[in-house]
């Protein structure tokens, strides 16, 4: 019973909040170009979905490509850093610098340097997304139980055997935690890059539609695009959560 | 089987863990390394396993006994199983690392798990096993490559007393039946007296061998109560009283 209530609570809260919102908009007679109510937003989506859906698809393509690139880059760097202390010392400060530099600040440069707009957006989103995967995977690799490393040594394991049969599986839970953070960051990175690129960039993503709608004071459409972004974020987060549950079910099975 | 000649170990921090250790381990012995925390008994085990090198002195293996991969079985204080693998997969690991296929190894994995009384738990993952069962899997993993020497580092220290007694009895029986050479680190006088055929008493700071005691407790169901056992416990206690720094 309690579980069911907990499941329903976010939806109930959402319906309540939307009701209050719509009620206030009606009661205070706020014009739709300032704050549209949920119904106006829904109507905007219904009339504009031919523009908004391809824009969503474009943003998601950038997000997912960037997440894949961030996974490859993050895991590769983490493994290399675990294998060589020298490599770690050389790379770590630069990874941190890349992480703390706001992507808004470097996106204009990347968009100038990378000719292909899609690639430029993916590069920006990857820069935002790869760090949690790198740092979590590196922490997981470093936390491999030393007794098991000894056991592998005593049995004459090769470096590759130690990596694939011990270190990487040990780091899997940490990697998945990082992946879940990076999934939502990749979306943020894609949106930021689209904002910076503006019409000079790919000119088709959701962020571009938001800018365009704001110039034209089409506030309901802006909100509709925002809702799509929010839902995408939740879906990505939940999907990665499901992946985590699925991959770790073996070791959690009692 | 192996001789320790004036072995000492100093860590980079300056700690002298072991000093002037001399001992000959014979094939088929059950040796207990007995001493308080910090006497270097685990370090001595790691030196024997080749996981660390002595600072001075040498560890000389008899001809034909130089250990290669899989010749030394090692059991740690924790079971340290792969949490994502079943009991059978954990026992398979040492064979897998040396390129045996699962099909080749299947029969041996089965008999080894049965040897430690876990035949029915081959498919269970560590999370579903009790502490004692996990330790049994860990022992099976050490035995599966048929090592010439079994090194055990306080394997039962974290178990409750009932489980510990059962495992001690089973390990002693396993030693009598297989004749394996076992070196067993412990800080329990009772455990050493019950299990071992020979007890090396160690004193701390720096770790030295203070006494080398041959045990002659008769086998049988009253091993823990018989006069020889009580006399041995008494003898070891007296030895510690003399060698321990105040």
Image (cartoon, rainbow, N blue to C red):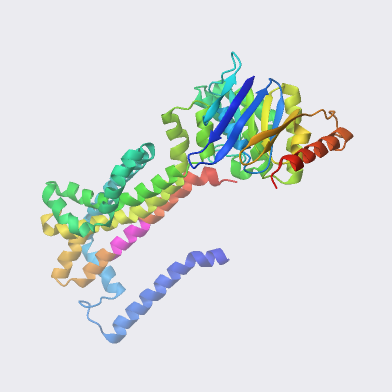
Q: Would you place residue B99 above or below residue B243 in this image?
A: above
Front residue of A59 and A4: A59
Front residue of A8 and B143: B143
Residue B47 is left or right of residue B231, and the answer is: left
Residue A60, how many percent across, how many down?
27, 52
Front residue of B100 and A57: B100
Residue A223, how many percent across, how many down?
25, 69
Q: Would you place residue A117 above or below residue A212 in this image?
A: above
Q: Tell whether position A77 is magenta.
A: no
Residue B167 is left or right of residue A14, and the answer is: right
Residue lying at the far bottom of the rendered structure: A28
Q: Would you place residue A128 above or below residue A1 in this image?
A: above
Number of numbered discs on residues: 0
At horizontal 14% and vertical 56% (from top left) the residue drawn is A108
Quarter of the rendering occupied by the N terminus of chain A: bottom right
Occupied quadrant, residue A86: top left
Residue A216 is left or right of residue B3, and the answer is: left
Residue lying at the far top of the rendered structure: B63
Magenta stretch, overall SS: helix
At horizontal 78% and vertical 35% (from top left) the residue drawn is B193
At horizontal 68% and vertical 31% (from top left) the residue drawn is B119
Judge whether residue B33 can be spotted in this image: yes
Range drawn in magenta: A227-235
Q: Tell whether position A234 is magenta.
A: yes
Residue B169, how many percent across, how many down?
77, 34
At horizontal 87% and vertical 38% (from top left) the residue drawn is B225
């Amino acid at each position: 019973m309690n579980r069911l209530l907990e499941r329903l609570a976010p939806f109930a809260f959402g319906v309540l909040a939307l009701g209050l919102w719509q009620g206030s908009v009606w009661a205070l007679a706020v014009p739709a170009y300032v704050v549209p109510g949920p119904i106006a937003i829904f109507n905007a989506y219904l009339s504009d979905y031919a523009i908004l859906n391809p824009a969503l698809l474009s943003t998601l393509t950038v997000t997912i490509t960037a997440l894949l690139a961030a996974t490859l880059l993050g895991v590769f760097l983490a493994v290399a850093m675990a294998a060589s202390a020298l490599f770690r010392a050389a790379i770590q400060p630069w990874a941190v610098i890349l992480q703390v530099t706001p992507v808004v600040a470097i996106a204009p440069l990347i968009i100038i340097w990378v000719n292909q707009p899609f690639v430029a957006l993916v590069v920006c989103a990857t820069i935002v997304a790869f760090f949690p995967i790198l740092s979590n995977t590196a922490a997981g690799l470093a936390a491999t139980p030393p007794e098991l490393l000894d056991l592998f040594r005593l049995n004459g394991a090769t470096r590759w055997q130690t990596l694939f049969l011990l270190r990487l599986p040990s780091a899997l839970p940490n990697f998945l935690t990082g992946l879940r953070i990076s999934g939502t960051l990749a979306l943020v990175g894609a949106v930021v890059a689209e904002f910076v690129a503006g019409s000079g960039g790919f000119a088709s993503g959701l962020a571009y539609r938001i800018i365009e709608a704001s110039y034209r004071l089409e506030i309901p459409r802006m909100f509709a695009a925002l809702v799509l972004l929010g839902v995408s974020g939740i879906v990505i987060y939940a999907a990665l959560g499901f992946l985590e549950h699925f991959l770790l079910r073996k070791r959690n099975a009692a | 089987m192996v001789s320790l000649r004036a072995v000492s170990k100093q860590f980079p921090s300056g700690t002298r863990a072991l000093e002037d250790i001399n001992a000959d381990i014979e094939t088929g012995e059950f040796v207990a390394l007995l001493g308080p925390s910090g006497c270097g008994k685990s370090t001595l085990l790691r030196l024997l396993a080749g996981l660390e090198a002595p600072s001075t002195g040498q560890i000389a293996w008899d001809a034909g006994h130089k250990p290669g991969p899989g010749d030394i079985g090692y059991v740690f204080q924790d079971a340290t199983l792969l949490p994502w693998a079943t009991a059978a997969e954990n026992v398979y690991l040492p064979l897998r690392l040396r390129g045996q296929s699962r099909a080749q190894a299947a029969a041996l994995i089965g008999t080894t798990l049965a040897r430690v009384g876990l035949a029915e738990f081959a498919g269970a993952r560590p999370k579903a096993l009790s502490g004692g069962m996990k330790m049994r899997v860990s022992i099976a993993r050490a035995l599966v490559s048929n090592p010439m020497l079994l090194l055990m580092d306080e394997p039962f220290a974290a178990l409750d007393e009932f489980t510990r007694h059962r495992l001690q009895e089973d390990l002693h029986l396993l030693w009598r039946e297989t004749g394996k050479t076992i070196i067993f680190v412990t800080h329990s006088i009772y455990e050493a007296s019950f299990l071992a055929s020979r007890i090396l008493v160690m004193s701390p700071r720096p770790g030295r061998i203070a006494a080398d005691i041959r045990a002659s407790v008769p086998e049988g169901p009253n091993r823990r109560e018989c006069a020889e056992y009580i006399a041995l416990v008494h003898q070891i206690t007296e030895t510690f009283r003399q060698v321990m720094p105040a």
